[in-house]
Amino acid sequence: LLELVRTHDALFPWRVLYTNGSGLAADERLIPALHAARFDRVELSRCHFDEAINHRVMRFDHGVAIRRREVFEETVRRVLATGPGLKLVCILNQQAVRSLDDVERYLDDASRLGVKQVVFRSLSELGELYVENRETRWIGQHRVSTRELLEAVMPDSTPRAGWTFEGMTAGYYYSNEVYRRGDVEVVFEAASYVAHADGVQQGVLQKLVFHSTGD
């Protein structure tokens, strides 16, 4: 992948690695390689800083080092120190971060590590696109509404103490409200696979995703 980026530099003006951090923790060569290939940022997923709570959702095998809190935090520090930007991504759900108090504790931990950007992302609305199965039932049962959190951040149009509203953005299947709390940019993101499917039907190519298999 890195050789592909170097060979076709102009085709990739924006470069992001989405990861649960397992590879970054396992091989210390990867972070410098991302920096050398001029990646803009790493989007690192973590549902909770507490490893036991995080494991309810992310379910790492015992031998995967990033499962442990201290390894996760050290990986965050190494990414920040080496050069690529870093954005922590927390998938909101009923088993981990689900309330504004949970959000603020997560942000306190992130700020302590020097993280400047955090996204709290809702589980996507699925509509009638998927056959009901274990995964879709879990999503339906554990989805946390970003709207309810936003109402807690800005009750009666007045931001909660310590929070500042910065703006809104929208993409082809998601919408964001952007805030600042202390020195951290905080994004609440809602997404809809129904809107995504509608966009696909229009024939517009929105994104290329490269998988570790080479696909």
Image (spheres, rainbow, N blue to C red):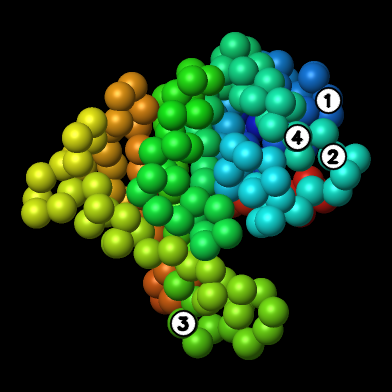
CA separation in Å, label 3 and label 2: 34 Å
Please report whichever mark, 4 or 3, sits nearer to the chain's N-terminal start: 4
Q: Label 4 near label 1: C-beta < 8 Å?
A: no
Question: Disc 4 vs disc 3: Cβ atoms closer than 8 Å?
Answer: no
Residues tagged 3 and 2 counted as in contact (Cβ below 8 A)? no
Nearer-the-camera pick, 112 or 178? 112
What residue did someone put label 1 on? 27
Residue placed under numbered mark 2 in the picture: 64
Label 2 element class: loop
Lower position in the chain sequence, tag 3 or tag 2 = 2
Q: Is residue 68 left or right of residue 121?
A: right
Quarter holding residue 116: top left
Foreground: 106 or 171? 106
Q: Alpha-carbon neighbours of circle 3 within 10 Å: few (<14), some, or many (≥20)?
A: few
Q: Which residue is mark 3?
A: 127
Q: Which mark is residue 48?
A: none
Label 1 vs label 4, nearer the camera: 4
Disc 4 vs disc 3: which is toward the camera? 4
Residue 138, image x, y percentages: 61, 73
Q: Amino acid at mark 4?
A: Arg
Label 2 close to label 4 by CB (< 8 Å): no
Task: State left or right for residue 134 relative to residue 214.
Answer: left
Kindly report the distance in space between the C-alpha atoms of the residues bearing marks 1 and 4: 16 Å
Looking at marks 2 and 1 on the same chain, the residue that comes earlier in the sequence is marked by 1
Q: Quick check: 121 above or below 34?
A: below
